[in-house]
Image (spheres, rainbow, N blue to C red):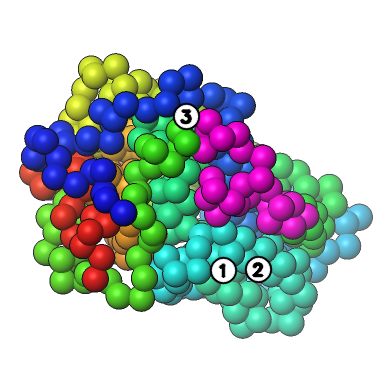
Amino acid sequence: MEDDSSAPETPGESACPLLNEQLPKGKGPGLFSVRWGLAFILHISLFVTYSQRVDLSIAIVAMVNSTGQQMSLNVSADVCPGPSPAPPNTSQPTDIKAPVYDWTPETCGLLLSSFSSGYLITQIPGGYLLGIVGWKPVLGIGLLLSSILSLLVPSAAELGVVYLALIQALRGLSQGVIFPAVYTLWTKWAPPQELTCLMNFADAGTTLGTFFTLMVGGITCQILGWPAFFYIFGGVSCVWCVLWFFLVFEDPDSHPCISTMEKEYITSASTQKGPCHSWSLPLFSMLKCGPLWAIAVAYFCCDWLFYTLLTLLPMYLNRILHLDTGESGFLSAPPYVGNWLGHIGTGLLGDFLVAKSLLQLGTMRKLFTTLGMLCPAALVLVVSYIGCNYIAAVILFTLSMTLISMTGAGFAVNLLDVAPRYAGFLHGVINTLANLSGMVAPSVAGFLNSQDTLPGWRNVFFLSGAINLCGVIFYLIFGRADIQDWARVDSIP
């Protein structure tokens, strides 16, 4: 089969011949099409995925005896006027018969980090495997196993810390294959004109899942007990996974209900002409590919800021602004809503700008990457200079999390431009490297703000901004949006 995207007429980042192809008329974006139905299904699936990633961090407050008392130790002297930190944990009603454990803060940290240790292991092998057996079984089995393991969390906790840490690691192992599969999925289902908006809409489910679980999980633990929280969420997730296997199909050719016109529209404009990679991979070409390194560096730098906000925002609201646990939890929610809306809006805007020829694809990727990395970094830096105005702080944090979603139309989808055939495997590699920043950033931030002062937090935000600036410069120099020669159909090894 001849690769329609080979030998682009104009070299460089602006080359994207698929966007200029004459496609079947009348088959443009449609919210009731099969491909948008798949995006909605994936939105829910990623909602489930992220609800399982944050469930223990919510439930552990009710699982641990006097967690609030332990967590309020070593709080700095007054920075902002306000009430004392939250009193010892009283969220567990006395009539709820749920186990409570005497775990230290170090033990809690170990349990919460166990997920990441497993998550990093399966990204690369999962990305390699799905190119051979297909994305549907890899994604479906990974999500189903993670859902089943959620049901085992209460029993594992009763057996001991080691068993619960093992379950957490296994859940991470199960979910490590999911996002590489998502990238392979869209190479078969997304026309270039809709790639950014389809992928961003599906990915927005991660933020919505985090927000919903944070808001509902605490109430569930309080009313029904924390074991019921895992049984209910895990049970619903298992039911969804069973339905998922009947609702999705590997590609348009295998879907029984898709119309002929839509199938022709998708296959004629697909970002990937031909099959995914086989057993062999052009590893040397990948290693010396500047555009891939640009994506990897941008991922690492942006994740540094993202994980800093994700893990430390409630702590900042509590220790610096002296908001109690309930207030800080409630005020931590708006940034997630902003990020969810930003994902959806950014995807639509990015595809619109390219479709109307207002921006070339490469220019759009770099513009959205720059705005999505530098603006959030600047906004969180301003937070450390506004003093004790918690309303302004929440507004700035919300704007920051909203604008960071612009990277979803930038480097985050760029792999599907430069190497669609290997997108699943490469995302596994790059996301593994990027998640290292998620492991390091909170520790570095803890060292810089060990005294919990505004100058200490200012250093945290300055460092995040400097790292993001370096990532943007590197991406602007080496980033591209045209398919690489070694990733074309006629260069299969």
How far from the left and from the top, in percent, is residue 94?
Answer: 87, 55
Q: Is residue 45 magenta?
A: no
Q: Does residue 122 appear to the left or right of 168 in the view shown?
A: left
Q: Residues within 10 Å of mark 1 (few under 14, many from 20)?
A: many
What residue is pinned by disc 1? 174
Cα distance in 3D space between marks 1 and 3: 27 Å
What SS does tag 3 mark?
helix
What number is the disc on residue 145?
Answer: 2
Q: Position of residue 348 (x, y in %)?
A: 41, 25
For numbered disc 1, what is the local secondary structure?
helix
Q: Which residue is mark 3?
A: 344
Earlier sequence position, callout 1 versus callout 3: 1
Label 1 close to label 3 by CB (< 8 Å): no
Q: Is residue 146 above or below residue 224?
A: below
Q: How many labels, in total? A: 3
Secondary structure under tag 2 reads helix
Whichever of labels 3 and 2 marks the residue nearer the N terminus, that label is: 2
Give the residue drawn at x 54%, y 24%: 30
Q: Is the C-beta separation of discs 1 and 2 under 8 Å? A: yes
Q: Is any part of residue 432 visible from this angle? A: no
Compared to 304, does 12 lie above or below? above
